[in-house]
Image (cartoon, rainbow, N blue to C red):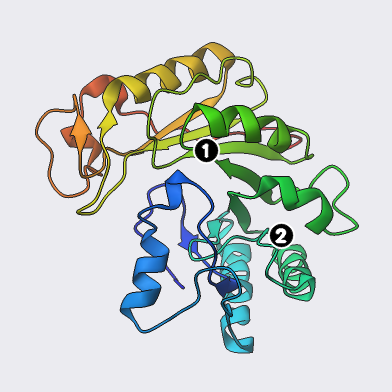
Amino acid sequence: MAARTSIAWCTHSWNPWWGCTRIGPGCDNCYAAAFDHRIGGDHWGTGQARRYFGDHHWAEPVRWNRAAERSGARPLVFCASMADVFDNEVDQHHRDRLWRLIRDTPRLVWQIVSKRVQNAPKMLPADWDGGYPNVWLLATVVNQDEADRDIPKLLAVPAAVHGLSVEPQLGPIDITRYARGADWVIAGGESGSKARPFDIAWARSLRDQCAAAGSAFFMKQAGSRPVGFGRLTGKGEDPGQWPEDIRVRNYPIARGSGG
């Protein structure tokens, strides 16, 4: 909900609501839907009511922002791990509240990750212009078809940072034609008992494409069915267990940040 998170590429995760609808192969083993169901929720699927939260929940990022102002930190906030900001089954007034919150928390870097980047132009706030300086906009793509379909849509939306969440990566992906526009690429394998294989060759290819384009690459985890990584434990999230050449965890520089 969560004050701290185990997700390697962010400081916090925070959700404006819970619930979504599966729309592609990356959603087949959705961890968020499984967790929601496990605690008695029913917020996934077309027509299913999303779970909304009260003022106390919405005040949490404001507290993080105050703490960041005192410390000088720039916490990274993953929004939304249990939802999709551009879900067309969520009324716009909920998104408008989110945009206000983001404007009111300029010390936080909001990482908005979506499988519905095509909806962004009609759902962004009127004052988006070239993008809010504290928002990184990422599209989730899990295979070549999704990359070719969605990366151009992502890059057409102005943003301080354009990123790709290639999780779970389900095959080799060539982003060469888009790499110079993608500031950040996260790669990772699927976890859980139904996890699909994740080949280290796929991650190495993305790493090399990013290096050639000057983009930041972040290797998140090898997942529960790694191929070519050697002997791993858990979800393969410990970089110390990986081959040394794939221990790459870089972050992007936002446009206009001056570094």
Residue 48, picture quadrant = bottom right
- Name the residue rendered at 47%, 62% in the picture: 12
Name the residue carrying label 2: 106
- Name the residue rendered at 50%, 57% in the picture: 22
Mark 1 is on which residue type? Val
Mark 2 is on which residue type? Pro
**Where is residue 98 shown, x and y percent of the image?**
71, 69
**Where is residue 117 shown, x and y percent of the image?**
68, 46
Q: Is residue 124 visible?
A: no
- Name the residue rendered at 76%, 35% in the picture: 256
Indicate whether 189 appears above or below 72: above
Pointer 2 with pointer 1, Cβ within 8 A: no
**Where is residue 89 shown, x and y percent of the image?**
68, 69
Residue 6, picture quadrant = bottom left
**Where is residue 23 shown, x and y percent of the image?**
54, 52
Secondary structure beneath dot 2 equals: loop
Mark 2 vs mark 1: in front: 1
Secondary structure beneath dot 1 equals: loop
Name the residue carrying label 1: 141
